[in-house]
Amino acid sequence: MSIQQKINDSPIEFAVQIINDVKNSKDEGVLKCVQCGMCTSTCPAARHSDYNPREIIERVLDGDLSIIEDDSLWDCFYCYTCHSVCPAGNSVCEVNQILKQIAVYKGIGYDKLYEYLGFADSYFTAAIGAIPEIFFTDIDRDVPGWWDFRQHLDEIRSELELDPPLMPPKDVIEEVSKILTITGFKDKIERIRSAEEESK
Ligand code: SF4
Ligand code: SF4
């Protein structure tokens, strides 16, 4: 008698939930992971933290739901290196995004997102993502001269005979705001903001 793993048997259910998520572009890539570790060996986040993309997939395949609460998940910054090198056609990057989304739905990780809410706000004011002001000091520290460059960007563009940067017109900003409100994005960022501010 042959032994077959049914697609809805535990612990594979967790992997199937990820496969069925709209963010997954790799079909059944998660199930094809051969644990080669190529993702981990090329991952910049793994080089500088405890984050381990190979282990993320191992835990998903083990049905280990506690991964949602693992702080190291937030060390991935979506460079997509793992996505392009995986020999099995998996994307830990996308799996990470799906896991974080599950975490956020469960009210986990708000503290990680709070600092980035300025980025979300800029979609409502400019219809594009902009670096939150709270990061300006750190960026200027890490990239000396950045703030001076930013302050004089218009003059520099003019000296180089470049047109001013193209910004979305008012009607586009209104349309983007409407979409983000109807789809629940606005509610979500307000929920995160108020939960974090109440906890302070
Ligand atoms: S590179 Fe792909 S197959 Fe190899 S461990 Fe990472 S996810 Fe699995
Ligand atoms: S996307 Fe995330 S997991 Fe993949 S290589 Fe980049 S930092 Fe690592």
Image (spheres, grey):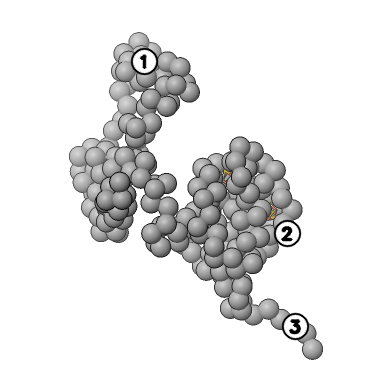
Q: Is residue 125 left or right of residue 81?
A: left
Kind of residue at disc 2 = Val
Kind of residue at disc 1 = Asp
Q: Residue at x 23, y 52 (%)?
A: 178
Q: Which mark is residue 34?
A: 2
Taking 97 as reference, is 78 above or below it? above
Question: Which element is circle 3 on?
Answer: loop
Residue placed under numbered mark 1 in the picture: 148
Residue 97 x/y as whole percent? 49, 53
| Structural crowding at the residue carrying mark 2, measured as other residues with C-alpha within 10 Å and reported as few (<14), some (14–19) or many (≥20) | some
Residue 160 x/y as whole percent? 38, 13
Which quadrant of the picture is home to ligand 1? bottom right
Residue placed under numbered mark 3 in the picture: 3
Taking 169 as reference, is 62 above or below it? below
State whether label 2 is within 8 Å of ligand 1.
yes
Spatial CA span between label 3 and label 1:
66 Å
